[in-house]
Image (cartoon, rainbow, N blue to C red):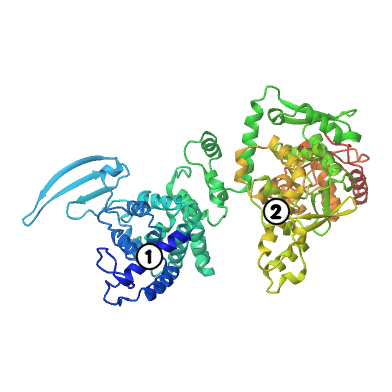
């Protein structure tokens, strides 16, 4: 506070104590001698001491001039809207008055109802409908009634003696007499003032209101009882956290019941309403808006969704689309949308394919050269075809899968040095010592091409990589997916009650740089700054930023650039990080019983043939590593697509010559299985085929 302002307060308190203020007030300050409860001070020295004390302790709170402003800033709901009242307060910089009003009225259900009754909504303010004026006469009184018909089928009846609004149906603008449009505009205005004290007051009051609305079936038994909840929902998006906090306060049974009610409402409506068009059904859309806070898929919506209509609405930005609430959509729907978009983009290209010619023994350099020759987003959106030089294989999908598999294996080879392997997590993280820009861009492009061409890759990144690819912010909890031991140490430092300065931790990090230890300061002079209980949160923020951002910035920039060169679709924003990981990497659910159930048999085989019985017995007895080899042999990838092995369209075709090894058409997920007479011969031939699979029998 400035010295000039303090001096002004002292002078005003001195005047009030010695001769009284000159304000025309109904109730003077307790520290003004015009108030009968305040004794006039004759000694100027004593008055000066008191004035200094009051100025420092109370500031303007008990100045009569301030009280006069407060008297003039009384809210009269019959004469002005709440928004106009706040604007009037802002004009005189009466921010304490605004804050007091918010805390007094926005935190109590009954007072919310009191201030939010729509008494000023008129035809002129809405500028809609047709106005008709009629005169009604009774034996006792004559009143003039103005009736306005709204486009939303609502009726406003405004009597000259009582301007309360009623409407036939609740809608986006009104709920049980509440002017929701005004409520939304009011909250937007208050937040636009960009004052932390006002924003905090809204959060505090909204939290108080939500606490007062803890689930109680006996009190929420009518639409009117929901008015405070509807009011709470008008708060701007950041305030929706308050509603989440309210839901957290539910008991387990009440929360499950609430969730079940909304889920069941959607399901029952879809099952019982004839010809319901979910893309246009407002009750279902409204239920989805609430469920956005809960982030759950809805199977019936996914099963009944008209994908063509919904995707068309999304791409043309017309009508409603469930991409507005992506949490409702499962990963299969999102993947389908991506594939539709990619197919449409491929059809726009002048030439049909992007062809890479590579040598097996020089596959990384050849891949880089091919990319440099076609390094344009439009080129990368063509369907990819691979030609191994010197080989006759025609790429109908299988050769492409093998190309991705070999490139990934070589790039993640420890000798290549681009990534560091975490043995306990079995994941790879960026090697900060590696400066192979083109190779990091290549692996980003490979991830993008795999997603674009619907190929599953055997890559194992921490989840935070997929968060960063999707533009999610990262925090200290993401360190756990990179280094659990380090994360545990940092959390201990954050939560301990001990004096952490005794740990002698500084704002610096020791790293290994080609065998040499280097000290990286997290802030200027950080190696000399001890972490203590006061600055530890700053240290944790700096450390998190260093580990997940700045230390890998050179590698990440190239990696991200490569990925975005191929995948720049707005549809990616529909995905959660774990969904993006599943689409790129698949899952590790090696349940071959599921694969056996969905297998088709061709060329004379049936599931009851003895060779088929021998085959499945042999497969189920394989180790997990050999099962992965079998998947790679037959499908071109040892990863399982999202949804499990039941999602693979797998077939076994009969081959009469029992002296041949099994072979496969990976583009069709088809196994060519000779009719072996014994289980031993089948197992022997199958193992030979699996152990010598690369480049053999793949098309």
Image position, residue 508 (x, y; %): 77, 58
46 left or right, relative to 515: left
Residue 45 position (above or below residue 194): below
Identify the element where label 2 is drawn.
Answer: helix
Residue 642 is at least partly visible in this image: no
Identify the element where label 1 is drawn.
Answer: helix
Foreground residue among 475 and 13: 13
Per the model, the C-alpha gap separating discs 2 and 1 is 51 Å
Question: Which residue, given by chain and number where applicable, does mark 1 sit on?
Answer: 11
Foreground residue among 16 and 353: 16
Point 74% across, 44% down: residue: 556
172 left or right, relative to 415: left
536 left or right, relative to 301: right
- As drawn, the label of residue 545 is 2
Image position, residue 311 (x, y; %): 55, 38
Q: How many residues crowd mark 2 within 10 Å: few (<14), some (14–19), many (20+)? A: some
- As drawn, the label of residue 333 is none
Residue 334 is at least partly visible in this image: yes
Image position, residue 679 (x, y; %): 90, 51
In the rendered structure, which disc, 2 or 1, sits on the residue that comes first in sequence?
Answer: 1
Foreground residue among 5 and 228: 5
2 or 1: mark nearer the eye: 1
Image position, residue 327 (x, y; %): 57, 50
Q: Residue furthest top?
A: 350
Point 68% across, 28% down: residue: 378
Quadrant of res 665: top right
Point 32% across, 62% down: residue: 65
Looking at the rendering, in which quadrant would you find the C terminus? top right
Residue 384 position (above or below residue 185): above
């Amino acid at each position: 506070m400035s010295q000039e302002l303090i001096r002004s307060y002292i002078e005003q308190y001195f005047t009030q104590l010695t001769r009284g203020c000159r304000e025309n007030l109904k109730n003077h300050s307790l520290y003004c001698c015009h108030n009968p409860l305040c004794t006039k001070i004759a000694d100027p020295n004593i008055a000066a001491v008191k004035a200094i004390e009051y100025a420092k302790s109370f500031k303007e709170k008990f100045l009569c001039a301030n009280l006069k402003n407060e008297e003039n800033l009384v809210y009269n709901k019959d004469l002005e809207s709440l928004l106009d009242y706040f604007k009037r307060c802002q004009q005189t910089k009466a921010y304490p008055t605004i804050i007091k009003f918010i805390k007094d009225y926005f935190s109590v259900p009954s007072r919310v109802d009191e201030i939010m009754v729509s008494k000023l909504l008129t035809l002129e303010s809405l500028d809609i409908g047709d106005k008709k004026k009629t005169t009604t006469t009774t034996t006792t009184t004559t009143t003039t009634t103005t009736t306005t018909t709204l486009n939303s089928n609502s009726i406003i009846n405004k009597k000259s003696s009582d301007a309360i609004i009623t409407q036939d149906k609740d809608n986006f603008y009104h709920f049980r007499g509440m002017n929701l449009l005004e409520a939304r505009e009011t909250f937007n205005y208050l937040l636009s003032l960009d004052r932390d004290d006002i924003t905090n007051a809204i959060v505090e009051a909204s939290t108080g209101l939500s606490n007062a609305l803890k689930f109680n079936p006996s009190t929420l038994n009518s639409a009117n009882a929901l008015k405070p909840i509807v009011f709470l929902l008008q708060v701007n998006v950041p305030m929706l956290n308050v509603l989440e906090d309210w839901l957290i306060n539910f008991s387990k049974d009440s929360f499950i019941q609430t969730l079940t009610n909304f889920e069941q409402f959607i399901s029952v409506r879809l099952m019982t309403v004839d010809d319901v068009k979910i893309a246009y059904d407002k009750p279902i859309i409204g239920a989805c808006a609430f469920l956005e806070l809960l982030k759950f898929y809805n199977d019936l919506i996914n099963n009944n969704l008209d994908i063509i209509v919904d995707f068309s609405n999304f791409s043309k930005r017309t009508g409603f689309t469930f991409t507005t609430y992506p949490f409702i959509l499962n990963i299969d729907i999102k993947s389908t949308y991506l594939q539709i978009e990619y197919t449409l983009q491929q059809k726009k290209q002048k030439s049909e394919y992007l062809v890479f010619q590579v040598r097996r023994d020089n596959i990384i350099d050849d891949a880089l050269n091919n990319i440099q020759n076609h390094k344009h987003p439009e080129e990368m959106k063509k369907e990819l075809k691979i030609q191994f030089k010197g080989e006759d294989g025609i790429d109908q999908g299988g050769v492409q899968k093998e190309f991705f598999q070999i490139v990934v294996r070589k790039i993640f080879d420890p000798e290549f040095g681009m990534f560091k392997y975490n043995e306990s997590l079995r994941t790879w993280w960026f090697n900060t010592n590696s400066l192979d820009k083109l190779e990091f861009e290549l692996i980003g492009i490979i991830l993008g091409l795999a997603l674009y061409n619907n190929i599953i890759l055997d890559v194992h990144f921490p989840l935070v990589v997929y968060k960063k690819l999707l533009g999610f912010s990262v925090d200290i909890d993401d360190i756990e997916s990179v280094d659990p031991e380090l994360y545990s140490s940092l959390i201990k430092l954050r939560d301990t009650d001990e004096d952490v300065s005794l740990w002698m931790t500084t704002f610096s990090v020791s790293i290994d740089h080609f065998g040499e230890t280097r000290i990286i300061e997290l802030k200027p002079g950080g190696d000399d700054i001890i972490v203590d209980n006061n600055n530890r949160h700053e240290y944790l923020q700096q450390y998190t930023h260093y580990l997940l951002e700045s230390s890998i910035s050179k590698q990440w920039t190239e990696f991200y650039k490569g990925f975005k060169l191929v995948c720049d679709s707005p549809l990616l924003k529909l995905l959660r990080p774990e969904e993006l990981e599943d689409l790129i990497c698949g899952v590790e659910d090696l349940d071959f019983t599921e694969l056996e159930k969905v297998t088709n048999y061709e060329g004379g085989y049936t599931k009851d043939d003895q060779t088929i019985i021998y085959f499945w017995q042999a497969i189920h007895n394989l180790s997990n590593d050999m099962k992965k080899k079998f998947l790679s042999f037959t499908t071109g990838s040892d990863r399982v697509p999202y949804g499990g092995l039941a999602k693979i369209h797998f077939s076994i075709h009969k081959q009469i010559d029992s002296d041949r090894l099994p072979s496969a058409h990976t583009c069709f997920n088809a196994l060519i299985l000779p009719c072996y007479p014994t289980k031993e011969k089948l197992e022997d031939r199958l193992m030979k085929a699996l152990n010598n699979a690369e480049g053999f029998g793949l098309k």
